[in-house]
Image (cartoon, grey):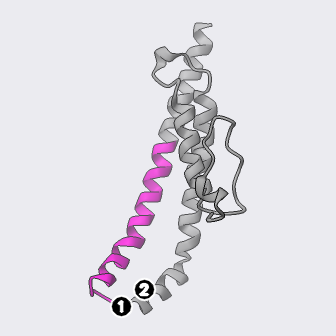
Amino acid sequence: DEGGQSASLDEALLCLRDIRDAWNQYWADAHAMWQPLFDAFRGIGTFGPLRAEYARVGMHRIVRDDVRAMQLALRRGRAACSGLPPATGLSGMSQLFDAILAMLQCSEEGQVDAPSARAPACASKAAGAC
């Protein structure tokens, strides 16, 4: 059905936009955190005030929420791209999203969703590192 395929493609494209937006938010927040940290390592500033500021703003929660937003966007993208015909150029995206989700899921033990059967297992999780 051409109309259904067009709607599915439109949904997938919206999901790709959401993934990009989630990544951009993560990157903005991570950069805001890492640049001052990097500067402190270079001797510009000290760690004590930086640590206090990160605790005050809840930087760990901000980054956690950004990662969760990326996970949600990737799951939605995986679902939207699943079953799309090869002519769309998006038929293999579900496997890519599975791989990225597997990497993100290893980042927070206890807060993970099982990847689909196609996703590779986290090697470090099997070794007890995650």
Q: Residue at x 27, y 87 (%)?
A: 43
| CA neighbours of label 2 inside 10 A, class few (<14), some (14 to 19), many (20+) | some
Query: Residue 81 at what x, y percent from top left?
Result: 57, 28
Q: Main secondary structure of the magenta part?
A: helix
Does residue 8 sit above or below 79 in this rendering?
above
Label 2 vs label 1: CA separation? 7 Å
Per the rendering, the mark at residue 50 is 2
Q: Residue at x 54, y 22 (%)?
A: 9
Tell me how many marks there are: 2
Left or right relative to 39: residue 17? right
Which image quadrant for residue 55? bottom right
Which image quadrant for residue 128? bottom right
| CA neighbours of label 1 inside 10 A, class few (<14), some (14 to 19), many (20+) | some
Does residue 130 sit above or below 104 in this rendering?
below
Q: In what element is the residue under mark 2?
A: helix
Q: In what element is the residue under mark 1?
A: loop
39 part of magenta stretch:
yes
User: Which amino acid type is shown beneath numbered disc 2?
Assistant: Leu
Which span of residues is magenta-colored? 19-45
- Label 1 belongs to which residue? 46
Q: Residue at x 64, y 61 (%)?
A: 127
Per the rendering, the mark at residue 3 is none
Does residue 45 sit above or below 72 in this rendering?
below
Left or right relative to 107: residue 41? left
Query: Residue 71 at what x, y percent from top left?
Result: 60, 49
User: Which amino acid type is shown beneath numbered disc 1?
Assistant: Thr
Circles 2, 1 touching at the beta carbon (< 8 Å): yes
Query: Residue 88 at what x, y percent from top left?
Result: 48, 19
Does residue 71 sit above or below 59 in this rendering?
above
Query: Residue 118 at what x, y percent from top left?
Result: 64, 34
